[in-house]
């Protein structure tokens, strides 16, 4: 589940306490629905809704979902004041405009950034252009996290666009008071998250300052990562936990430092979660972090595993510096409370839809 999906689910949960909110979600996503969500129905054919099919045939799966949404359009009669697409992707936009009866007025969330869009492959760029055509015709408001992207929608596509932030449920975090790991990583196990850089850091530490590293997450590179750990005889230094839900907070809080060598992020939600637990963050110097995280975060040049390792050792071996970093980070993210975020975004949406 992406950060954008999580954002949409959290908004629905909080808005649903005071308003009638319905979620339309694929069969594959139903495990993320909790009891206080108002689930109207699931989109898609259950025969195809499994992770293996989704990874190998994403376009076919998205097409099936869209066709299913179109079929339900003819039997579904409820009217909504606000219809939101959780992302700018074509296959998320399509069901939204179907349920809005092909009228202008949907609200679209975009959690990417403009620089990343420029690096995409030809097919993805084509799908982005198709999405922009839909947005220009049917969208009333785009909510985005990237300032350049906001300007792009405002001045290139001539659509209202506003900046948003992500939030965190601080009262649901599970905390450990013991520090078992020198550092930990939480994220999807794909190359862009820098998982091989974590292996390099562990290799550098073996004969110098042996580290205990926890890795939480799943993904297509899980088996390769496990094999690499075994091949490099790092079993005593790296522990794989697989996917964890709220238990991940126990791992983060039981670590001295959160190590996050990701090469691309649109926000970095897990950084916010770590800081909220008082655990400082060491990561690569990505531009997206500059406007979001002011305290509790230490950055090194992207891809420089030597600097990553040296800075990691410097931080965890200085208890005063480590504690001070963690305290500053925890104070700095207090404004990112989900209730405040959700309330502000609903006011913003209502304002622009009434214009």
Image: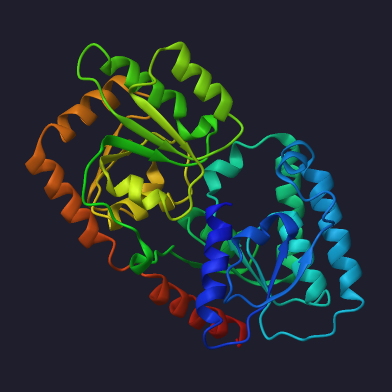
- At a point 10% along the width and 35% down the height, the residue shown is 318
In this view, the residue in front, 42 or 35, is 35
In this view, the residue in front, 265 or 275, is 275
Quadrant (top left, top right, bottom left, bottom right) of the C terminus: bottom right
Q: Position of residue 29 (x, y in %)?
A: 67, 57
Residue 144 relative to residue 235: left or right: right
Q: Say which quarter of the image contains residue 37.
A: bottom right
Q: Position of residue 103 (x, y in %)?
A: 80, 77
Q: Position of residue 100 (x, y in %)?
A: 78, 77
Position of 102 relative to 183 (above/below)? below
Q: Say which quarter of the image contains residue 109.
A: bottom right
Position of 193 relative to 349 (above/below)? above
Q: Say which quarter of the image contains residue 190.
A: top right
Q: Position of residue 139 (x, y in %)?
A: 69, 70
Residue 307 relative to residue 14: left or right: left
Would residue 291 be seen by someone viewing this image from the given angle? Answer: no
- At a point 36% along the width and 55% down the height, the residue shown is 273
Total numbered labels placed on residues in the image: 0
- At a point 27% along the width and 66% down the height, the residue shown is 334
In this view, the residue in front, 254 or 21, is 254
């Amino acid at each position: 589940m992406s950060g954008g999906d999580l954002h949409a689910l959290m908004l629905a949960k909080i808005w649903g306490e005071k308003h009638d909110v319905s979620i339309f979600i694929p069969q594959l996503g139903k495990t993320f629905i909790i009891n206080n969500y108002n689930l109207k129905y699931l989109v898609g054919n259950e025969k195809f809704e499994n992770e293996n099919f989704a990874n190998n045939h994403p376009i076919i799966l998205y097409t099936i979902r869209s066709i299913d949404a179109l079929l339900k359009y003819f039997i579904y009669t409820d009217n909504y004041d606000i219809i939101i697409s959780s992302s700018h992707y074509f296959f998320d936009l399509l069901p939204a405009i179907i349920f809005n009866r092909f009228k202008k007025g949907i609200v679209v969330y975009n959690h990417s950034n403009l620089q990343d869009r420029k690096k995409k492959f030809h097919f993805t760029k084509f799908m982005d252009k198709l999405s922009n055509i839909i947005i220009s015709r049917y969208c009333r408001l785009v909510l985005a996290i990237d300032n350049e992207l906001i300007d792009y929608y405002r001045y290139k596509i001539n659509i209202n666009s506003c900046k948003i932030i992500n939030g965190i449920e601080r009262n649901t975090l599970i905390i450990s008071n013991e520090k078992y790991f020198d550092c930990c990583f939480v994220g999807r196990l794909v190359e862009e998250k820098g998982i091989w850089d974590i292996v390099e850091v562990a290799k550098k530490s073996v004969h110098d300052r042996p580290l205990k590293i926890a890795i939480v997450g799943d993904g297509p590179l899980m088996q390769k990562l496990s094999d690499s750990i075994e091949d490099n005889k790092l079993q005593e230094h790296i522990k794989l936990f697989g996917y964890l839900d709220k238990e991940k907070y126990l791992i983060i809080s039981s670590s001295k430092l959160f190590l996050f060598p990701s090469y691309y992020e649109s926000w970095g939600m897990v950084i916010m979660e770590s800081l909220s637990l008082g655990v400082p963050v060491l990561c690569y110097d990505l531009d997206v972090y500059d406007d979001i995280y002011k305290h509790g975060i230490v950055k090194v040049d992207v891809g420089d595993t030597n600097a990553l390792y040296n800075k990691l050792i410097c931080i965890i071996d200085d208890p005063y510096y480590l504690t001070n970093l963690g305290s500053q980070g925890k104070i700095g993210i207090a404004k990112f409370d989900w209730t405040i975020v959700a309330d502000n975004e609903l006011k913003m949406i209502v304002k622009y839809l009434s214009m």
